[in-house]
Image: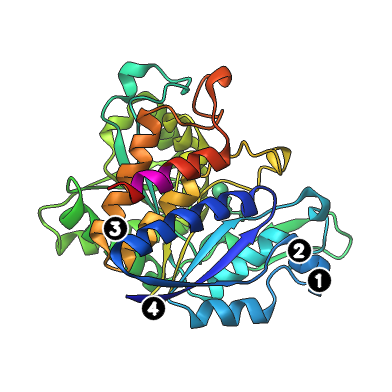
Amino acid sequence: MKKNISVIEGDGIGPEIMKQTIKVLNSIAKKYNHDFYYHKTIAGSIAIEKFGDPMPEKTIDTCLKSDAVLFGCIGDEKYDHNPRGKRPEDGLLKLRKRMNLYCNIRPIMVYSEVNKSPIKKELLDGVDFIIYRELTGGIYFGEKGRSKNGEEAYDYCFYSKKEIERVGEMAFKAALYRRKKKVTLVDKANVLETSRLWREVIRKIALDYPSVNLDFLYIDNAAMQIIMNPRRFDVILTDNMFGDILSDESSVITSSLGLLPSASIGNHKSMFEPIHGSYPQAKGKNIANPLGCILSGAMMLEYFGMHKEKNLLEKAVRKSIEEKVCTPDIIESEFFSTTEEVGNYIEKYIQNQ
Ligand code: IPM
Ligand code: MN
């Protein structure tokens, strides 16, 4: 198969983790006779410096024309105080909106060899859940502003039934066809009107999926249950803001934010990005964990319908962890491997299969 892939390395450790990701994807392409064409394009602080815009139209165009987008990570504190619309993060939000990537999928799986979670081990064995986060609505995208004198600020949280339905359908389909038939809707329906609308819409969808079990948790309780009883979850369905918070929290279960991939899916377009930020403290040090980005690549292969390819890539990642070829975030520091060494191990493993 031929695929055109837009690549945005982004800020901080972005270029380093993306380099490893492309390397291992190339070894997959070679093995299975695919042609992957990468189209590098810029966003985040580099784009601010070059064009004064964290997400130039040209970048959006390139992304819209390709079969999928691989995204590294974004954020640079130098620009944290830029006006609204001109911060690196605004660029990412703009791209998600313009590509209409309404469904963000974040799998949380535990590798038994990795033991750097502060949570008791007996709570973690067998944890395997997935977060379906709405990605183009809610408080992230509602009107925002300040009063004239700057003394007051607001962020408007808005959801339409349609926005809830489309991500809700995706979550129920995943629960039914690919997982353990359980959806937990996380909201704050004891306080928020948008949450009450979510419950109404999701209850209705559930009628079409009688074999899927639906339950509800308030966000405050869910935040506690993820630590106390993470095995209770299968598919967590939630809005943009709560999904953002719960996915970082869930990374504590897996030991490192650096391990977690995500897929952002729209009707016709999709983007694959690790859930971590730009980790500027590690930039250029060859210590960043490339696995979140590489596993996002695996999710992209699955989206292309390349199931054997995805399985092999995931197997290679598992092997690297079993063989303790790991960056310092997931192994005792005296034994760590570099970002590059992890990529090389995975590349070799694929070549030797
Ligand atoms: C994420 C990130 C982004 C978000 C930031 C960088 C805007 O934290 O993908 O989880 O809040 O969605
Ligand atoms: Mn986040």
Q: Nearer the viewer, residue 224 or 31?
A: 31
Q: Is residue 266 magenta?
A: no
Name the kind of residue labelled 1 in the image.
Lys
Residue assigned mark 4: 268
Q: Contact, CB < 8 Å: mark 1 with mark 2?
A: yes
User: Disc 4 or disc 3, which is closer to the eye?
Assistant: 3
Q: Nearer the viewer, residue 289 or 38?
A: 38
Residue assigned mark 3: 309
For mark 2, give the secondary structure.
Answer: helix
Residue assigned mark 1: 50
Name the kind of residue labelled 2 in the image.
Ile
Q: Is residue 348 magenta?
A: yes
Give the mark nearest the N terminus, 4 or 1. 1
Q: CA distance from mark 3 to mark 1?
A: 37 Å
Q: Quadrant of residue 8?
A: bottom right
Q: Nearer the viewer, residue 206 or 255?
A: 255
Tell me if I can see residue 109 in this picture.
Answer: no
Name the main secondary structure of what is drawn in magenta: helix
Residue positioned 15% across, 61% down in the render: 207
Q: Position of residue 342 (x, y in %)?
A: 49, 39
Q: Quadrant of residue 222?
A: top left
Tell me if I can see residue 41 in this picture.
Answer: yes
Q: Is residue 150 left or right of residue 289?
A: right
Q: CA distance from mark 4 to mark 2?
A: 28 Å
Numbered range of the magenta stretch: 346-350
Q: CA distance from mark 3 to mark 2?
A: 33 Å
Name the kind of residue labelled 4 in the image.
His
Q: For the residue carrying disc 2, how many other residues have a C-alpha within 10 Å: few (<14), some (14-19), or many (20+)?
A: some
Residue assigned mark 2: 46
For mark 3, give the secondary structure.
Answer: helix
User: Disc 4 or disc 2, which is closer to the eye?
Assistant: 2
